[in-house]
Image: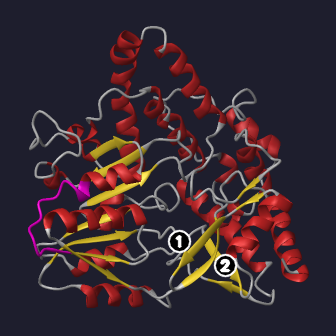
């Protein structure tokens, strides 16, 4: 039996359920009595539960945003915390921001560490996944001829960063292809195994590929190079706060993510995890007085910045913990399956994302064969106010669909109807 909306609100207290007001220092309460004994899959289908979550996001419902993989809006309490601290810091910034607000960043680090399942002294707070990963890419000691192995589906900014190191330092970037959608986890592992050589010094890969939402078997790939002089870098921009895992369990050396995607933190927030033994040898992207320091904070030296932005991460974590990452992961997969199930019988519908839970999450990319991706995306936006993401890759093309926890089934029904109309009428 589904939870009633009254029961869920009462579990928080009527004054706080929609505002999600909570001290940043408080531990997340739960599990809710109404949810005990229920599977995450059962909760994922409970529309009364998710209606309250949806109400916590003050989004524009005149638009249907299905590009949360690009950047997500924040819940009301995150925005309120940001406005509060911005106003306070503006009173006398050199005093209020540096003396009062900046020390609070250490609590944010601790809360991020708890969410990541990692020690706080291995967590750097950055502005996005690009900054996190560029810190590693440009901070590693590599020699001419050293090889970096990645895929041809990794994020373009990261590929460009490695190409710049090719030009400057004489390293070699090797890119492998993986099948889309992959038939199995082993097929992906085999592709990486075939790409390794005696010259490989770095393996760089996405945890979840931004193009299709394909979830890579990172642990198995990391195990391939265990015992060799190879470091593993993971782009976790789409997996962190989306999939339920602990970063150290991946068995890698570095992990970078944006927090303004699936965590719904303020725009311009990110995370970099570095295994403790790797911190000292890693050069900071921005110079530090002691480049070889083993203090993770050496990687945060960006000069003056708006301190209230990272502080509001704490409210986003509070929101995440109140939902529960496992429940959120199940809900995002449910939303993905909801719209795919209603389109898969459509003539020309082609899904480029596996539906195997071990190979995907809540993101999926599809195409209507014979309908140009640009035309379909423009039609959905101009005629139906639906925001999607066009994907064009040498192997495939399509529209990436990435709902979030604030997305309603009625909005997905509208999306499905619009795609069917486009296929029926031609565009």
Q: Residue at x 42, y 75 (%)?
A: 216
In the image, 117 versus 160, the foreground residue is 160
Q: Residues within 10 Å of mark 2 (few under 14, many from 20)?
A: many
Label number found at residue 244: none
Indicate whether 28 appears above or below 252. above
Relative image position of residue 46 (x, y in whole percent)? 76, 58
* Label 2 sits on residue: 366
Q: Is residue 145 magenta?
A: yes
Outermost residue, front direction? Answer: 167
Relative image position of residue 168 (x, y in whole percent)? 17, 62
Q: How is the image coloured?
A: secondary structure
Relative image position of residue 21 (x, y in whole percent)? 62, 28
Which secondary structure dominates the residues rendered in magenta? loop
* Label 1 sits on residue: 211
Q: Over which residues does the magenta segment extend?
A: 136-147
N-terminal label among 1 and 2 = 1
For numbered disc 1, what is the local secondary structure?
loop
Q: Residue at x 33, y 14 (%)?
A: 99
In the image, 22 versus 402, the foreground residue is 402
Q: Quadrant of the N terminus?
A: bottom right
Q: Is residue 1 visible?
A: no
In the image, 16 versus 11, the foreground residue is 16
Q: Residue at x 30, y 43 (%)?
A: 124
268 left or right of 81 in image: left
Answer with the quarter of the image where residue 42 lies: bottom right
């Amino acid at each position: 039996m589904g939870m009633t909306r009254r029961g869920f609100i009462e579990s928080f207290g009527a004054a706080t359920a929609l505002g999600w007001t909570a001290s940043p220092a408080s531990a997340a309460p739960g599990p809710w009595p109404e949810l005990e004994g229920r599977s995450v899959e059962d909760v994922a289908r409970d529309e009364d539960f998710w209606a309250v979550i949806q109400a916590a996001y003050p989004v524009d419902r005149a638009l249907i945003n299905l590009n949360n993989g690009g950047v997500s809006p924040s819940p009301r309490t995150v925005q309120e915390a940001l406005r509060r601290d911005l106003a306070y810091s503006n009173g006398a910034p050199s005093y209020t921001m540096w003396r009062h607000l900046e020390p609070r960043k250490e609590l944010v680090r601790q809360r991020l560490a708890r969410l990541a399942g990692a020690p706080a002294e291995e967590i750097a707070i950055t502005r996005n996944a690009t900054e996190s990963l560029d810190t590693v890419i440009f901070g590693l000691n590599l020699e001419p001829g050293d090889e970096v192995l990645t895929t041809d589906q990794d994020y373009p900014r990261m590929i460009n960063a490695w190409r710049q190191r090719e030009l400057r330092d004489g390293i070699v970037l090797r890119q492998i292809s993986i099948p889309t959608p992959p038939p199995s986890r082993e097929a992906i592992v085999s592709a990486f195994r075939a790409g390794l050589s005696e010259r490989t010094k770095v393996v760089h890969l996405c945890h979840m590929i931004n193009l299709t939402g394909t979830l890579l078997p990172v642990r198995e790939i990391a195990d391939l190079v265990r015992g060799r002089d190879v470091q593993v870098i993971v782009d976790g921009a789409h997996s962190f706060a989306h999939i339920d895992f602990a970063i150290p369990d991946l068995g890698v050396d570095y992990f970078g993510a944006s927090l303004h995607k699936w965590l719904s933190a303020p725009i311009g927030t990110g995370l970099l995890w570095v295994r403790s033994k790797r911190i000292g040898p890693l050069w900071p992207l921005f110079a530090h007085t002691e480049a070889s320091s083993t203090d993770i904070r050496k990687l945060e030296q960006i000069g003056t910045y708006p301190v209230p932005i990272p502080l509001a991460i704490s409210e986003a974590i509070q929101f995440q913990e109140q939902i529960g990452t496992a429940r959120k992961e199940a809900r995002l997969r449910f939303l993905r399956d909801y719209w795919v199930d209603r389109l898969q019988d459509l003539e020309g519908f082609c899904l480029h994302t596996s539906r195997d839970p071990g190979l995907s999450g809540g993101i999926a990319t599809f195409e209507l064969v014979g309908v140009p991706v640009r035309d379909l995306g423009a039609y959905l936006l101009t005629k139906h106010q639906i925001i999607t993401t066009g994907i064009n890759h040498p192997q495939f093309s399509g529209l990436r669909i990435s709902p979030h926890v604030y997305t309603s089934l009625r909005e997905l029904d509208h999306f499905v109807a619009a795609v069917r109309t486009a296929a029926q009428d031609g565009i």
